[in-house]
Image: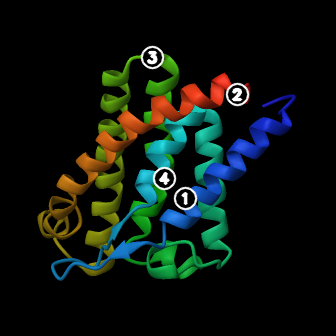
Amino acid sequence: MKNIKTTNLTLIALMTAVMCILGPLSILIPVSPVPITFANLGIYLTVMLLGMKKGTISCLLYLLIGFAGLPVFSFFTGGPAKLLGPTGGYLIGYIFLAIIAGYFVDKYAGKVHFYIVGMVLGTVVLYALGTIWLAYQANLTFEAALLAGVIPYIPGDVIKIVISAILGPAVKKQIVRAGYL
């Protein structure tokens, strides 16, 4: 991205901070080593506001901050071991979520139903990567990993997508009105 404006850098940093705040907020459920986390809500909102390129950069910064050891992942954890552990596939899946959902935001500007399609498709890819990695790490079958790492999370993720689809365009409208986008 050539000629990155200060406002773009600020928005990328701000949305990275939002992910860093939401990411550690987690709820452990007894049927899975994968906690309910609000990081994906941060990613949904980020791509709704910033689009694919800047949203993906923000997501990558979030992952790098966590990889460096700052406690921005679930339950205030961080470090390389988190990315290599049972939930690492979900964390890496955030990148694909940002790319896919951000693409739909950029390609179909103003069409919220397409934003939802992009968020759902991105989440499906995130689920697939996470499930494969969880199965490998926890020595589970794909079906068992799916039951532990996806099925319990679908209702919550649907709610997060709906919140983002409602809140994202309204906030973006205000950011554009203020002249920052």
| Mark 3 / mark 4, whichever is N-terminal | 4
State the CA–CA distance, disc 2 to disc 1: 23 Å
112 vs 75: above or below? above
**Quarter where residue 35 is shown:** bottom left
The type of residue carrying mark 4 is Gly
**Disc 1: which residue:** 19
Residue 26 image point, x, y percent: 38, 73
**Disc 4: which residue:** 42
Mark 2 or mark 3, whichever is nearer to me = 2
| Mark 2 / mark 3, whichever is N-terminal | 3
The type of residue carrying mark 3 is Gly
State the CA–CA distance, disc 2 to disc 3: 18 Å
The type of residue carrying mark 2 is Ala
- Mark 4 touches mark 1? (CB < 8 Å): yes
Helix, strand, or loop for circle 1?
helix
Helix, strand, or loop for circle 3?
loop
Mark 4 or mark 2, whichever is nearer to me = 2
The reply, left or right, for residue 132 in relation to residue 71 is: left
**Disc 2: which residue:** 178
| Mark 4 / mark 1, whichever is N-terminal | 1
The reply, left or right, for residue 47 in relation to residue 35 is: right
Q: Residues within 10 Å of mark 1 (few under 14, many from 20)?
A: many
State the CA–CA distance, disc 3 to disc 1: 24 Å
State the CA–CA distance, disc 4 to disc 2: 22 Å
- Mark 2 touches mark 3? (CB < 8 Å): no
Quadrant containing the C terminus in the rendered view: top right
Residue in view at x 30 percent, y 23 percent: 113
**Disc 3: which residue:** 110
